[in-house]
Amino acid sequence: MPKEVIMPALGMAQDEGVLLRWLKKEGEMVTAGEPLMEVATDKVDVQVEAPASGLLTAVTAQEGDEIPVGQVIGLIAAEGEEIPATPAAPAAAEPKESPDVNTSAAAPLPSSPVAARIAAEHGVNLADVQATGDRISKEDVEAHIRSTSSGTRVLASPKARRLARERGVDLASLDGSGPGGAVLAADVPLESQPVSVAPAVAEPAPPAIEPEAQPVSRMWQIMAERLTGSWTSVPHFYLVREVNADQLIHWRTMVASGVAEGTKVTYTDLLTKLAALSLARFPRLNAYWDDGNIVTNPEINVGLAVAVEDGLLVPVVHSADRLRVEEIAARRADLVARAGSGGLTPADFAGGTFTISNLGMFGVDAFNAIVNPPQAAILAVGRIADRVVAVDGQPAVRPMMTLTLSCDHRAVDGVRAAQFFEALVGMIEEPLRAL
């Protein structure tokens, strides 16, 4: 029996995935374990391997489709294996025969999920669509819409239609950039263009400069949605500490001299280790709020905010409290390198319990970070800079660093957060405490 190709679940909270592209064409032979398709989840793009060897056939999903997890989108048949026909939708009731009814037209050809969705959006009866193959495809529906519209119905996405209504824009006046010339949301200008009227004065009006809407990547959209949800639903509070980084600098120099050549130890690596040790002492900061309950995570996994071209990623250093600083540095370097090349996997994002965001290398003194849901806290790290501070009642110059702890007040209160912060600052200023 042919092996089913399904949309895989690449994350615990994943309900659907986007098929970015097929790496094999329908009718092409594939080998078990070789890349078959590329799928986008809410965090990362992943290549999915073929589950079996054989002929890729019965493909029902096209590039760009959003597909529920577990849905069959193709078959892999072994050589000589019979391919089952696409199952027809169950009938509600078998109609009685009537000489006036053409029963042969009552059973339309099967259609792809995308074709069915486009037909529903445009009010098209699939029975009226002329198929070019053994099933109705997206192209068949689009061709039907164009042939029956007579110029009155413009092929457009639902979002583009909504934006056009809101902005008073005539869809027929737009050039679509989507499949088959469909108008997409990015094609709809911010406002309608009024009919020009000759000015009453002789001097011509200066040309209006229209704002340009810049389309964003899927990663950026998901980042915006998640952080908007956190900002609007999580009651944030912030604790700020000025920290003497003199011993931290000294500790980094000592550790760097003892690691293998090519391994760079950063302040983020040191802070990851110290934060993990502090979380072990104050587990409430290593917890999260879940529908009226506070859940404490059994492991300490520190996420590191990494900026890439398409948005923000937070890969995780797992079991950071049990790793040596050199191991954390190697893990961090590997994560950052693969984040830049698009090589991160879902496992690299799984299980984060606390996050560190360091902007010190960009000259930022201090900032407030948004809690990374569903975690209870995030540590924002500013740059190390010489500042005048009071030492034994006298002014002195010391390398200082500003730390800001953002917390979810549902999971942790100010006292517990302050106790955690005090322990962390103490180990930064005296790293021997960590040993």
Image (cartoon, rainbow, N blue to C red):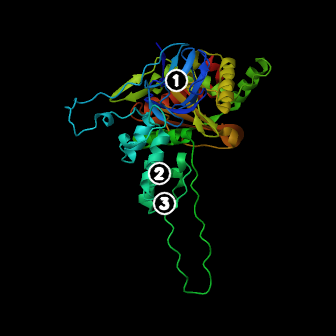
Residue carrying label 2:
146
Q: Can residue 234 be seen in this view?
A: no
In the rendered image, the vertical position of residue 393 relative to residue 147, given as above or below: above
Which residue is identified by label 1?
Answer: 57
Q: Do the residues labelled 1 and 2 touch (CB within 8 Å)?
A: no
Q: Is residue 347 left or right of residue 255?
A: left
Residue 133, horizontal then vertical, whole percent: 48, 34
Q: Nearer the viewer, residue 108 or 13?
A: 108
Tell me where residue 231 appears, x and y as whole percent.
45, 42
> Disc 3 and disc 2: Cα gap in Å?
12 Å
Work out whether mark 3 precedes mark 1 in sequence or the reverse, and give the earlier one.
Answer: 1
Residue 107's quadrant in the figure?
A: top left
Element type at marker 2? helix
Label 1 neighbour load within 10 Å: few <14, some 14-19, many 20+: many
Tell me the CA gap for discs 3 and 1: 38 Å
**N-term-proximal mark, 1 vs 2:** 1
User: What element does badge 1 sit on?
Assistant: strand
Which mark is nearer the camera, 3 or 1? 1
Q: Which amino acid does label 1 sit on?
A: Thr
In the image shown, does 415 or 235 lie closer to the viewer? 235
Q: Are marks 3 and 1 in contact (CB under 8 Å)?
A: no
The numbered disc on residue 172 is: 3
- Give how far across and how far down residue 78 sits, in percent: 54, 13
The amino acid beneath tag 3 is: Ala
Q: What residue type is labelled 2?
A: Arg
Does 393 sit left or right of 195 as displayed?
Answer: right
**Residue at horizontal 67 percent and vertical 17 percent from the top:** 327
- Label 3, residues with CA under 10 Å away: few <14, some 14-19, many ≥20: some
How many residues crowd mark 2 within 10 Å: few (<14), some (14–19), many (20+)?
Answer: some
